[in-house]
Image (cartoon, rainbow, N blue to C red):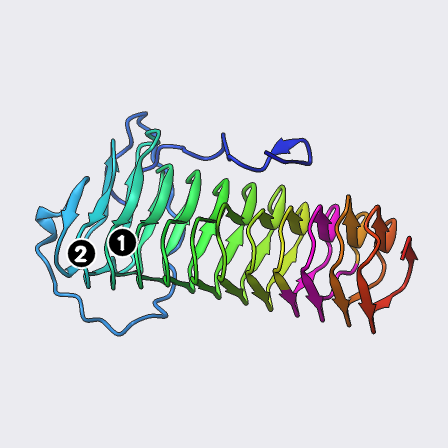
Amino acid sequence: MRWILGAAILPWVGGCREAATVGGGWPASDGIDYALPDRPPDTDADTDADDADTELVGCDTVLTGDTLLTRDIGPCFGDGLNVAADDVTLDCEGHALIGAGIAGSVGVRIAGAAGVTVRNCRVGGFDDAFRVESGFGNRLASNEAFDALRGYVVEGSTANTLVGSRATGCDVGFALTDATVNQVEGNTVDGGRAGFVLGGATDGNTLATNTVTGVEEAGFHVDGAPGNQFTGNVVTASGYGFFLDEATENVLEANVASGNRVTGLHLLQSARNVLRLNDADDNGTHGVCFFGFSAPNLVEENAACGNGTFDAEQFASDGSVYVGNDFCTTHGI
C-alpha cells in the first residue's frame, strides 16, 4: 500500500456513503430528504430497450431482459439492480437508483455477462455505484455516480467501454482492477479522493479525454499496473495529476496536469514508461518528478513551467532519455 498526502491510496476507505432519497420520493431511513444532482444529458440515445413494467422492478431485482425505467428506485438496503444475462440493455432515462449506505452494496451490477448496455442512470448511496465483474464487451454510457465509495468499478473484466459518464463526490471515481483492454473515454470526475485508479494486473487499457477536477489525491493513480495508454486527459485543482507507483510500460501522451497542489507527473520506482507531449504547468512543487529508481523512461517533447520547486527533477533515477523537452527549470537532469 502506498501513501500520498498522508492518506492511503489503496484500498479506499471512508467518504461518501451517505443515505439518500429519490427526488420527489420517499425519505431515507434517517428522515432527511437528500437532493439529487441534475439529470445528465442523454448522449447515447439510440434506444432499443423495451418499456418494461417497472412496477415490478425494485431494489435487488435481477434483470434478464431489456429494461426501461420509468421511475426512481430506492432507498435500497442492499443491492440495486443486477444484470445477469448477456445482451441486456438497461436504460434508466435519467431516473435515480438510491442506496442506503450499506457496506458492500452495489447499485448496478453486471456479473459474468457480455454485451450489456447500461445508460442514462443516476446512482448514489452504494459502496459501488456501478460494478462490472468478470464481464466482457459491456458498455456504460451517459451515467452518473454520486456519493458512493467508488463510482465505477471494472474488475476481472475485458473489452468493456465506459464513456461519457460522471462521478461526483465519490471516494474513487473509476477503479480498474485486474482489468484488460478496456476503453475509458470522455468521462468526468468532480471532487472526492481520487479520479482514476488502476491496480493489479490491469493492462492494455486506454484512458482518453477524461477530465478530473478537485480531487484530494491523484487524478490518475497507476499502482503497479503495466502497459496502459493515457491520452488527452486533463487534471486540475487536485493533489497530483498523474502518480505512477511501481508501474512499467505505460504511455502518457498529450495530457494536461496543471494547477495541482503537488506535482503534475510523478513517477515513483517506475521504469520503461513513455512521457510524450504532456503539459505540466503551475503545480505546487514540480511539473515532472522522477523519484526513487524511476529509470529508464523516455521523456519526449513535454513542457513544464511555473511550478513551485522545479519544473522537472530527477532524484536517484539516472538513465532516462530526454528529447526535445521545454522545462523552464530542472534539477538532477
Foreground residue among 15 and 326: 326
Q: Position of residue 242 (x, y in %)?
A: 65, 53
- Judged from the image, the secondary structure of the residue bearing numbered disc 1 is loop
Q: Quadrant of residue 138?
A: bottom left
Graded by Cα atoms within 10 Å as few (under 14), some (14 to 19) or many (20 or more), the crowding at tag 2 reads some
Q: Position of residue 37 (x, y in %)?
A: 40, 50
Q: Quadrant of residue 137?
A: bottom left
Q: Which residue is tagged 2?
A: 70
The kind of residue on which mark 1 rests is His
Q: Which residue is tagged 1?
A: 95
Q: Is residue 315 above or below residue 69?
A: above
Residue found at x 34% / y 36%:
20
Which of the two labelled residues, at mark 1 and mark 2, occupies the earlier sequence position? Answer: 2
Foreground residue among 147 and 254: 254
Numbered label attached to residue 2: none
Graded by Cα atoms within 10 Å as few (under 14), some (14 to 19) or many (20 or more), the crowding at tag 1 reads many
Q: Are marks 1 and 2 in contact (CB under 8 Å)?
A: yes
- Quadrant in the picture for the C terminus: bottom right
- 171 inside magenta stretch: no
The kind of residue on which mark 2 rests is Thr
Residue numbers of the magenta segment: 252-281
**187 relative to 237 in the view: left or right:** left
Q: Position of residue 297 (x, y in %)?
A: 74, 60
- Judged from the image, the secondary structure of the residue bearing numbered disc 2 is loop
Foreground residue among 22 and 218: 218
Residue found at x 56% / y 45%:
194
**8 relative to 167 in the view: left or right:** right
**120 relative to 254 in the view: left or right:** left
